[in-house]
Image (spheres, coloured by chain):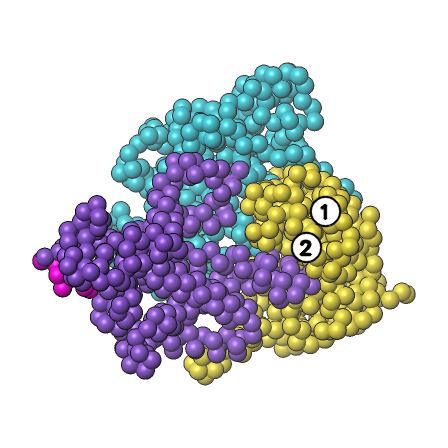
Chain colours: A cyan, B yellow, C purple
Amino acid sequence: MSRDVASIEGLSVAFGRPPTQVLALRSVSLTLRAGQITGIVGESGSGKSTLALALIGLLPQAARVTEGAIRIGNQNIAGLPEARLRAIRGARVSMVFQDPMTALSPSRTIGGHLLDAQHRDRASGRSALRTRAIEVLRKVGVPDPAAQLDRYPHQLSGGMRQRVAIAMALLGRPELLIADEITTALDVTLEAQILHLLRELRSEIDGAILFISHNLGAIAEICDQVAVFYAGELVEEGPVRDIFHSPLHPYTRALRDCDPARIEGAARHLPSIPGETPVVRAPPTGCIFAPRCSLATELCRTKVPVWAAIAEGRGVRCHLAVSKT
Amino acid sequence: MTEPLLHVRDLSVTYPLRRGPLDMMTGKPGRLEAVIEATFSLQAAQTLAIVGESGSGKSSLGRAILGLETIAGGEVRFRGQPIGPASLASLRREAAMVFQDPVSSLSPRRSVGQLIGEPFRIHGLTNRDVKAEVLRLLALVGLPGSMADRYPHQISGGQARRVGLARAVALDPKLIVADEPTAGLDVSVQAEVLNLMRRLQDQNGMAMILITHNISLIRHVAERIAVAYLGRIVEEGPAGALLSAPAHPYTAALIAAQPHPDPDRRRTAPPILGETPSLLARPKGCEFRSRCPVAMDICASQAPLSRGDGTGRVVRCHLTADKETGT
Amino acid sequence: MFASLSDFARRDPLGFIGLMLVTMILFAGLFGNWLAPYAPSKIDVPSRLLAPSWEHLMGTDKLGRDVFSRILAGSALALQIGVVTVGLSVVIGTVLGLIAGYGPRWLDSILLLIFDTTYSFPTVILGLALVTLFGPSTTTLMGLVMLFLIPAYARLVRSSTLAAKGADYVLALRSMGASSGRILGIHILPNVIGPVIIVACMDVPAIIALEAGLTYLGLGVPPPAPSWGRILEEGTGSIREAPWIVVAGGLPIILATLGFTFLGESLRDRLDPKRKGRA
């Protein structure tokens, strides 16, 4: 088994204070390994973005880590002061954001952005940094990279900007690359290209990639390991084939079945999950998915299911799935 | 054949661009052609999906049908009548629009009840019991009557979409133009909105134009599909045939680009390279040529014309034209 | 809005102070003439330059006039110039701004040219010119102030109207066949009026201070009208013998400034629809 790059152990994150607090993440444990793309699937309110921000030490002021650890390598970064976190961001952990239109500063050239991304490398001369910037731009599929350095973000198309943002993230040679909904704002034909780029990078970088998306198709396309989040909890984790072919949690199954791309032929009535994702303000007293679950029993409504590890990297949080296996 | 509910012929929409003296010297065009010579028709109770990526002109086309854009060329006929200043008022009573961003399409300082009642007030139908109508419409889209006192910023995205739908169907329209009605919704909720639209359509017998970028979704909701690229409809035809055997290389690429939620069906390479060119720098000849995997010499020199294949499908591609002359 | 005044005072103390001060000034302005213990312009030379006492709360000036009565009477004038002028400017500016922002482009260009031209005149020079032409009077002063406020408010409304014009909800209303008047009056107006009200609230004290300043320079309200600026000006003449006159003249200007500013800040928070009534 390959090296652990980052691990989250029993992490709980809350926003605000009671009674208006939001328990955005509850007892989440997850390990990210080198050479793997781990996919995080979840709908709005699942806590997937909070998880990403926790991993790069960028949780907003209102957020508190109430329990658990966030380990990058062997270092627990939960509660570290800002100065120590800054040394981790961009160097050990990098992040690419959803919107390529706003992720780059409009008044700075592409070359300027790429030099900034290497600010820790003081030893190398300017020309060496430039050469490296061109090399990384080529790696992410930007045509004629040397000519792009003097251009401004608005002169580039959306797809090119997202490639530049990925190049910036790679320049710090991170152990962990976080890609938060990076294809959501792109056209389908572009999305396919960026997904393939990430897949190629997986073998290139000596680290782990965390790919966050609400799009099951994109997850299935490039991930090795998949973690399914619902309302702040990790409800199921497993290798990509297991998650899509033999899901254990009713939510995973329902979510997969909702995807119109999966339904062959023309369906007049599309499956859905009735209800809405709850905002969790107090520790739940039963399974968090029970109100929307078609299989929920009395047990589900009254007892919180615990995480059941079935195998290395495979587990589920569901009363019914556990009793079956 | 009966007169179609909606007939769009050679419809073009252009936007003027602000140009400085320098722009004129460098030859920057004075206008942006968002929609070029779109032609299609729609029968009552039918759904047509207009599919395309950014820059395809699909939203401009949708708005032009409802007279919300200045038409630069061609015409739109609704129930046989060409749309013009005289017929606009009746068109807007019988056709409604559903917008992409549900919250921003609701006037922020009006309550949900006022918003749903707005079409009645606009068309002077105050002799009806507007309050009762509002409650009926809320129930129709599956929202509680108490929702009427809420304001747009107090409701969720899914609820706002239902409010938008309730308002659209308030006056029993014959046609609904829906621009990305499920964009930004979670998959688990998206289906509910689509099912609701379907149900409303079955009840009222209205026709629907669904504008979307999501090709995996339209198979389930549309009878006909029009694929737009750089403002031109490149292929149009019955949904099933078009999806199972796309004739235009761009349609094929769009279908193939959609990732499949099955790790066993991964693709080895992206189905199509490059990006949609700028509307101000259209390629010569066939405009898809710059990204087309099967482009030929003729594609660079000559723009293909739309041709029907006799089965209700219209394609704008030299490739299919060749096949026809070959047989 | 808040359930009760005490709740308001607890949640937004500065706004509450602002509201109290503004209410006080409005009250003084409306009923000052009845409340004044003496006729504000009654000259009583024997009792000149008296120090504050129970008989004369703020003392008397060099003509023996009761300063407190003159301050009360002056608040009516301050209100007329501050509140009435600003209010009229808000109404006219908003209408012009809505027309410029929503109307055809040529009309917008013409109105914008007019706004920019009037706005670019230097205040003091134009003030001097107007006073020379029409003579110093309250009307001249109000006209001068409106000449500057109307284009400022109109520009503000125009830019938010332009933004609203492109918004989806306006497109939605047009798609339903709503008339321009309906769209402007019922839907756009409530969304663009907020910023103007806030700016106007902040402008009221500035205008009152401007009046005082111009009067001090001899360009404002002619004597013997008891304006705060005039009281201040006359007070400086006898600042050695009777410093209380300057204090009495300056105090209402400071209170008005604080009151309207606090109220404006509070309104700014309140008029944002996303901040109020969030569930």
In the rendered structure, find residue B118 and report the number of the disc placed on it.
2
Q: Position of residue B22 (x, y in %)?
A: 43, 81
Residue A285 can be seen, yes or no:
yes
- Asked if residue A31 can be seen in this view, the reply is no
Q: Position of residue B280 (x, y in %)?
A: 54, 72
Number of numbered discs overlaid on the protein picture: 2
From which residue to which does the magenta span run?
C233-240
Extreme-left residue of the structure = C240
Q: CA distance from mark 2 to mark 1?
A: 11 Å
Q: Nearer the viewer, residue C243 or C254?
A: C243
- Residue at far right of view: B1
x then y, percent, for residue B104: 57, 53
Magenta: main secondary structure equals helix
Amino acid type of the residue that numbered disc 2 sits on in the rendered structure: Glu
Task: Tell me if residue C128 comes above or below residue A276 in the rendering.
Answer: below
**Residue at figure coordinates x 77%, y 60% from the top left:** B94
Q: Nearer the viewer, residue B224 or A219?
A: B224
In front: label 2 or label 1: 1
Residue positioned 38% across, 47% down in the render: C19
